[in-house]
Amino acid sequence: MACSVGKPVIAVFGAALLAACATPQQHMRITPMISSRAPAPEKPASPPVVPNPVYKVGEPYQVGGVWYYPQEQASYDETGIASWYGIDYQGKLTANGEVFDRNAISGAHPTLPMPVNVRVTNLENGRSIVVRVNDRGPYVNGRIIDLSEHAADLLGYRTNGLARVRVTFLGRADLYGPGPATPEEETPPEVASAVPAAPVTEVDAAPLPPVAGAREAPPPRVASLPQPVEQMILPAIPQIPDGQVVEMAVPAATALYVQAGAFTSPVNAGSVAAKLQSTGARVFPGVKDGRPIYRVRVGPFQSVDDADAALLEVQALGQNDVRIVVDAAAG
């Protein structure tokens, strides 16, 4: 709708009218929801948004200097910190054309296809639910997933604002319902054009060449990886976002790590760890999907604030593709 402003009678009225004519920008979550703040009062009803959901993988994109690479990830099973979002995005379109409803059981993820169903387990209290991923985000401090307000309530962390979680891919979701995708919706994924080079943390690359004139770095410290949380067995129940909360056994204690990369080459892992030597980075050998993997991590930490500070320190040293992960604390 066009909007014009005549000569103001009173300055404050003119300023208010100008503000009302401003064009809203597309939302971007850059900070987690503040947990100690009560939900804001309901805003006046807006014209209904017409949904047009599509199955979407998406092309690589950049936010805050970090590249994100959406892709099919049928084996996705990761841990990290979850946040939540609510009233400020109520009724707005999600990244795949659905309408965000803070009372639904949905979530946002930086790289998973949309819509897909994932199981999210709160590693602090054992509560576990199935969530429909239909949006992009979050983009702050290496958070792994951003859930709707109701989903955060079901998992018991809306008041706290953040939680240590495990996110496990279940399958594509029905475009117009909570269940799995229909056969007609099982279409080939999108083919991205002009794709930038994938980050070295995701490539089985050759050893990095030495830098001319540089002194040889000391060998990286190698540590034993704590018990992976991903080894917990998921319950055999219907895998749809129906609001059913399952109680699961969780580790007696967990610890946070800042992960600066996961490599198939131990030499590349050692190079990154040497670059981050001042942060106390170490190489953690392990196995994923039957293949050796070498994770470069800083930690462990017990508080999210300490992990956030370490993440910023790693980023300041030029390593942007970092995130916070959760594993069982070393005994």
Image: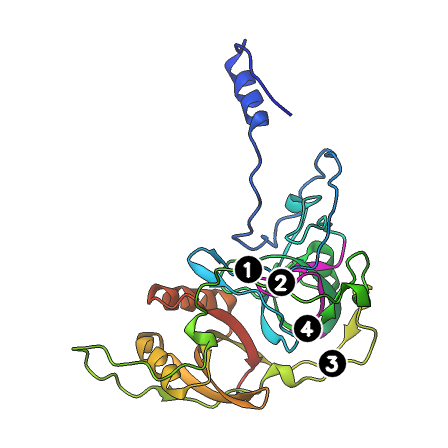
Disc 3 to disc 4, C-alpha distance = 11 Å
Disc 1 to disc 2, C-alpha distance = 8 Å
Q: Which mark is residue 190?
A: 2
Ranked by sequence position, the earlier of labels 3 and 2 is 2
Q: Nearer the viewer, mark 4 or mark 1?
A: 1
**Residues drawn in magenta:** 104-126
Q: Residues within 10 Å of mark 1 (few under 14, many from 20)?
A: some
Determine the residue positioned at 67% across, 62% down: 157
The question of residue 269 being in magenta is answered with: no
SS at badge 1: loop
User: Mark 1–mark 2 contact, CB under 8 Å?
Assistant: yes
Can you say whether 187 is above or below 29 in the image? below
Can you say whether 139 is above or below 9 in the image? below
Amino acid marked by disc 3:
Leu
Determine the residue positioned at 71% across, 59% down: 106
Which corner quadrant holds the N terminus? top right
Q: Which mark is residue 169?
A: 4
SS at badge 2: loop
Q: Residues within 10 Å of mark 3 (few under 14, many from 20)?
A: some
Q: In x, y percent, where is residue 198?
A: 46, 69
Q: On the picture, is 309 further left or further right than 278?
A: right
Amino acid marked by disc 4:
Phe
Disc 3 to disc 2, C-alpha distance = 30 Å
Which picture quadrant has residue 213?
Answer: bottom left
Label 3: which residue?
A: 234
SS at badge 3: loop
Label 1: which residue?
A: 59
277 or 320, which is in the foreground?
320
